[in-house]
Image (cartoon, rainbow, N blue to C red):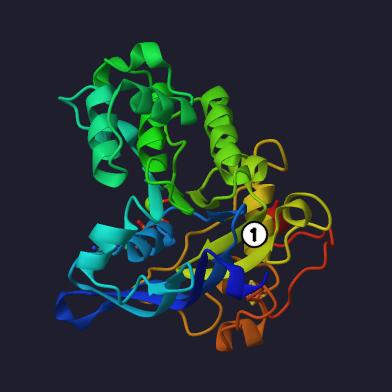
Amino acid sequence: MNRAHAVLDVQDLSVRFRMRGGRDIAAVTDARFSVAPGECLALVGESGCGKSVLASALLGLLPANAQTTGSAVLGGDVDLLTAGERTLARTVRGRRIGLVPQSPAAHLTPVRTVRAQLEETLRELTGARGPAAVREAAARASFPADHLDRYPHELSGGLAQRAATALALIGDAPLLLADEPTTGLDRDLVERTVDELRRHTDEGRALLIITHDLAAAERIADRVAVMYAGRIVEIADAGSFFGAPGPRHPYAKGLLDALPERDFAPIQGMPPELGSLPEGCAFAARCARADARCTAERPAFDGGLACHHGLTGSPQSLTKAAADA
Ligand SMILES: Nc1ncnc2c1ncn2[C@@H]1O[C@H](COP(=O)(O)OP(=O)(O)OP(=O)(O)O)[C@@H](O)[C@H]1O
Ligand code: SF4
Ligand SMILES: [Mg+2]
């Protein structure tokens, strides 16, 4: 993709947490990707691999013990990593990045109705007032007008998600950032939620969706970025990733093979501690393809892949679980 036209262009983004005793946690290392208008990039990977830390870095919401390097340029003119809290709060969050939260119930204010919250955000971000503007904002996220006077606790999980999405859409931000927007929803609601998000993408927004739900990623994404132990190890077109020829990175292949509707063969072992990463490939201890080079030398991320022995769609077993089975 042409980086010049990207809504978001991330280059070599790293996040380190400084811990007591001098030990650093390398939560994100050298992430590189971009997202174009009308495109959905799904960032997937096991729990604890750094997905939410990456999202927090983009929003300027990291805790004080975090150090970031690299760049994350929004709309060609603002580096989110150096912009400063004032700029991020006044011109970026809500206005240029719409945040679809992980837990809508927690994101919504419990003591105020959906209408009151939409009214306030409309006033703040667009200056619009009145019931028609509120109804229109709700309708954009398919939130039913006859539920506007309800409090968050009176909403189902799906409607709370729509209310949160309606709030995220008010600023007409060119980039939507959704961190696990379907957690806790049943399959039917997952599908409806991702279809809604896809619709907003088709209207021309860029969408970065973070999820460990690969079925949701397959349904919504144009491209997939796979993260392992803080690094993006593969970026691929969703069609070739989920279909033929399939993923090129053994870890990505392992993630897909673990799905119940595929081999249902989980990857054996655990990811390494982000505070003590191995010298070579972080996946080596779990990878059936690992050799001496893999344990000695970390593979560079090149051509959308970080692996010394990338796959070319061969059907052989690539993770220890599958190899041992
Ligand atoms: N404030 C912090 N200080 C130190 N370490 C942190 C801090 N916040 C996160 N981490 C560590 O960074 C790593 C990545 O966490 P992150 O929340 O990004 O994972 P994730 O990929 O979003 O996982 P999940 O799928 O469970 O949401 C974890 O090992 C976590 O313990
Ligand atoms: S083949 Fe080597 S470099 Fe590739 S994932 Fe396996 S251990 Fe890592
Ligand atoms: Mg997370």
Q: Left or right? Give the position of 183 relative to 21.
A: right
Image quadrant assignment for residue 13 = bottom left
Look at mark 1 in the image and give the residue it sits on. 252
Give the side of residue 239 with respect to residue 193, left or right. right
Please provide percent x and percent y for residue 83.
29, 73
Can you see residue 160? Answer: no
| Residue 45 spot, x, y in % from top left | 52, 56
Amino acid type at mark 1: Ala
Q: Residue at x 73, y 77 (%)?
A: 309
Q: Position of residue 123 (x, y in %)?
A: 25, 38
Q: Residue furthest top?
A: 146
Residue drawn where x is 55% and y is 33% of the image: 196
**Within-10-Å neighbours for mark 1: few <14, some 14–19, many 20+:** many
Q: Nearer the viewer, residue 324 or 53?
A: 53
> Please, is residue 171 above or below residue 107 in the view?
below
Judge from the rendering whether residue 6 lies leftward or rightward of residue 179; answer left or right: right
| Residue 134 appearing in the image | yes
Q: Viewer-proximal residue, 71 or 188?
A: 71
Q: Is residue 209 above or below residue 154?
A: below
Q: Position of residue 230 (x, y in %)?
A: 45, 69
Above or below, 201 against 299 in this view is: above
Residue nearest the viewer, comparing 247 with 290 = 247
